[in-house]
Image (cartoon, grey):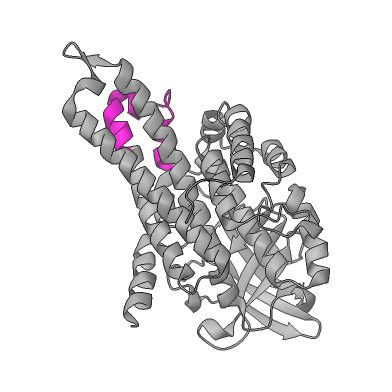
């Protein structure tokens, strides 16, 4: 066991931290306030290899590991969790095409996704199929060399803007074994979008329903075999959960630093806040929770990289713990700042709003507990 980052990992950690500080942090508040999807900044991140972190290099990916991705996403999220999270989702969808698409599909889609000339979205959730993802109703019926796709996906990050939609749909009977995965281009006739959702956070990325009405998609756009879609979706989510957990680490770390600076300068009752033992204890607990969460995320990422038999459990544990801890640390930081934490002049309230959804998406934290319990108890 070696808890030190390698020389290469420290190098791209520095690159990500520098990029986040210079290209993301100065604009994050405006992106949130004005609901800007920062395409130029995203493409600048892609030029550093951040759009295909664990996509193979023959199609423009960086060919790095899940642990490498966790390190990068923590740094990006320290500046803007919302934008970092979209990059995470783009990476997840791109990896699914890379891992399960055939040579033609990989070459058709991935070079432009790796450069973010095109953006990608992951489409699993439906209006009536959230945590019960295997109950999805979107259906694809085979018609010659095409599937005819009908149905609606909900809460899709990048909805209306992304160029490629990785869609889980029913090609067979009920349950998970009847689900397949298709890569659907934005210009597909019959594909349309709902209104842009008004959200608590994640305002630097668009979110909308994705609607399919007699949309014809080539069979060649299928990922893996027919009936493999649910398995593919869940494998994508293992990495997605780690990425979102890492984004929670970055947001929490940024809030912890703001709180530390505030405690060192703010005076009440003739003393700095940092001199009050009750607040020292609170801050110590926040720092400890962050360190513990980071260890869990890195351990789970390493397990996924190694193909550990218990990687799914570790990913669920890390996602549950890190996203809960991340939100709680932000909330405690806001409390330490008092009224200053509640106003938009400071980044804490924005980061808190962004991190709240991390406890819901990529599988709610209640579903993470279900996964953990089933795998440990065999139920």
Camera-side residue of 44 and 37 = 44
Q: Quadrant of residue 110?
A: bottom right
Q: Quadrant of residue 276?
A: top left
Magenta segment includes 352: yes
Q: Is residue 26 above or below residue 55?
A: above
Residue drawn at x 48%, y 54% as measured from the top left: 298
Quadrant in which the C terminus appears? bottom left
Camera-side residue of 117 and 317 = 317
Judged left or right of residue 232, residue 325 is left
Q: Is residue 272 above or below residue 277?
A: above
Judged left or right of residue 241, residue 12 is right
Q: Residue 137, how many percent across, how many down?
A: 54, 77
Q: Which residues are magenta?
A: 331-353
Q: Residue 157, how many percent across, how many down?
A: 57, 53
Camera-side residue of 166 and 110 = 110
Dominant secondary structure of the residues highlighted in magenta in the image: helix
Camera-side residue of 76 and 190 = 76
Residue drawn at x 49%, y 77% as measured from the top left: 134
Can residue 207 be seen in this snapshot?
no
Magenta segment includes 295: no
Can residue 42 be seen in this snapshot?
yes
Judged left or right of residue 171, residue 338 is left
Q: Is residue 124 above or below residue 172?
A: above
Q: How many numbered circles does the render carry?
A: 0
């Amino acid at each position: 066991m070696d808890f030190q980052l390698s020389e290469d990992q420290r190098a791209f950690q520095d690159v990500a931290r520098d990029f986040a500080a210079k290209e993301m942090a100065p604009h994050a508040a405006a992106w949130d306030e004005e609901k800007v999807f920062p395409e130029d900044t995203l493409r600048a991140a892609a030029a550093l290899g951040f759009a295909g972190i664990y996509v193979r290099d023959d199609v423009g990916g960086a060919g790095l590991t899940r642990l490498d991705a966790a390190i990068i996403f923590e740094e990006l999220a320290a500046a803007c969790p919302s934008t970092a999270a979209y990059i995470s989702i783009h990476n997840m969808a791109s990896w699914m095409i890379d891992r399960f698409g055939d040579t033609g599909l990989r070459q058709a889609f991935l070079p432009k996704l790796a450069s973010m000339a095109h953006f990608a979205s992951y489409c699993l959730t439906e209006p009536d199929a959230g945590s019960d993802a295997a109950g999805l109703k979107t259906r694809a019926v085979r018609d010659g060399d095409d599937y005819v796709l009908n149905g609606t996906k909900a809460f899709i990050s990048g909805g209306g803007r992304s160029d490629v939609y990785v869609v889980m749909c029913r090609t067979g009977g009920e349950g998970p074994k009847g689900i397949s995965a298709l890569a659907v281009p934005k210009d597909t006739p019959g594909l349309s979008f709902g209104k842009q959702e008004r959200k608590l956070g994640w305002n630097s990325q668009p979110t909308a329903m994705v609607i399919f009405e007699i949309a014809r998609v080539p069979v060649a756009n299928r990922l893996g075999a027919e009936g493999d879609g649910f398995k593919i979706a869940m494998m994508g989510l293992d990495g997605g959960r780690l990425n979102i957990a890492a984004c929670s680490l970055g947001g929490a770390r940024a809030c912890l630093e703001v709180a530390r600076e505030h405690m060192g300068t703010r005076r009440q009752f003739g003393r700095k806040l940092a001199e009050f033992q009750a607040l020292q204890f609170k801050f110590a607990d926040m720092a400890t929770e962050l360190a513990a969460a980071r260890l869990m995320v890195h351990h789970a990422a390493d397990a996924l990289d190694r193909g550990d038999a218990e990687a799914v459990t570790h990913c669920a544990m890390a996602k549950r713990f890190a996203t809960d801890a991340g939100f709680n640390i932000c909330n405690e930081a806001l409390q330490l700042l008092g009224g200053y934490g509640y106003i938009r002049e400071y980044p804490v309230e924005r980061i808190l709003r962004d991190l709240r959804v991390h406890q819901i998406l990529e599988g709610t934290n209640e579903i993470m507990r279900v996964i953990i319990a089933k795998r440990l108890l065999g139920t």
